[in-house]
Amino acid sequence: HLPKDLDVFKVDVDDFYRKRVKGLYGEIVKYTSLALEDMDKEGRSRVYDLRRTGSNIIEVLKNVSELQKNMWKYLQRDRVEIRHEYNELRLGIAQLSHDIEALRHNPDDLKVLREIAMIRHELKSIEMKENKHIDELIRHDKINTQMATSLMNDSRFASIVMSKMVEIAGVLWIEDKDIRTIEFEEEEKG
């Protein structure tokens, strides 16, 4: 079991977004809009991919903000089961961040593509297991219905965050445009 006092530090994601991201993202959109005029088709395609990635980063921040609301509340509770579940969500996102960072340093785009495909498959499996696990917690009266619905919603937010993180990694860490195209096709198959 995870200890109650597992490092909990609060980051105001909304404030971070307002002060550091929103203006920068707006400037990036403005600059790329102006630069697109002088680009060839391949250049425009890459810029659109990067802009979509910027949009995905914004979506990740907004979902993390939503996830945080209940996370801080339930991490302070005495009920071990709900604390454990929220710590598992945090640890899942942290582990994925670590795995994605490792991909960043891999120069072999095909290996990165394979790793991303494996991570996507694993995320789908985790999401199905999580739903079954929440059902078990309810059946065995380990969490109440309010906790269960919060956990279900927050598990979905965490799933969206992790899926978007993988998508972002595919755009940023795969250099070869043909391999990136394969990655986008795999992503769309979902």
Image (cartoon, grey):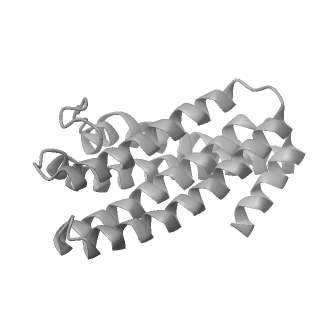
Please tell me whether residue 17 is drawn above or below residue 48 in the rendered image. Answer: above
Query: Can residue 40 be spotted in the picture?
Result: no
Where residue 123 appears, as percent x and y from the top left, is: 57, 56
Q: Residue at 85% x, 51% y: name it.
A: 41
Foreground: 106 or 24? 106
Q: Residue at 77% x, 60% y: name it.
A: 186
Q: The C terminus appears in which quarter of the rendering?
A: bottom right
Using residue 7 as the reference point, say whether residue 21 is left or right of it.
right
Foreground: 189 or 57? 189
Q: Residue at 80% x, 35% y: name it.
A: 175
Using residue 2 as the reference point, say whether residue 103 is left or right of it.
right
Among all residues in the image, which is located at the extreme left?
Answer: 78
Foreground: 43 or 105? 105
Please tell me whether residue 155 is drawn above or below residue 13 in the rendered image. Answer: below
Among all residues in the image, which is located at the extreme front?
Answer: 140
Where residue 36 appears, as percent x and y from the top left, is: 72, 46
Please tell me whether residue 148 is drawn above or below residue 120 in the rendered image. Answer: below
How many circles with numbers are drawn on the protein? 0
Where residue 149 appears, as percent x and y from the top left, is: 26, 72
Query: Can residue 132 be spotted in the picture?
Result: yes
Q: The N terminus appears in which quarter of the rendering?
A: top left
Foreground: 186 or 78? 78
Rendering quarter of residue 177: top right
Using residue 139 as the reference point, say whether residue 63 is left or right of it.
right
Q: Residue at 25% x, 69% y: name it.
A: 148
Using residue 11 as the reference point, say whether residue 161 is left or right of it.
right
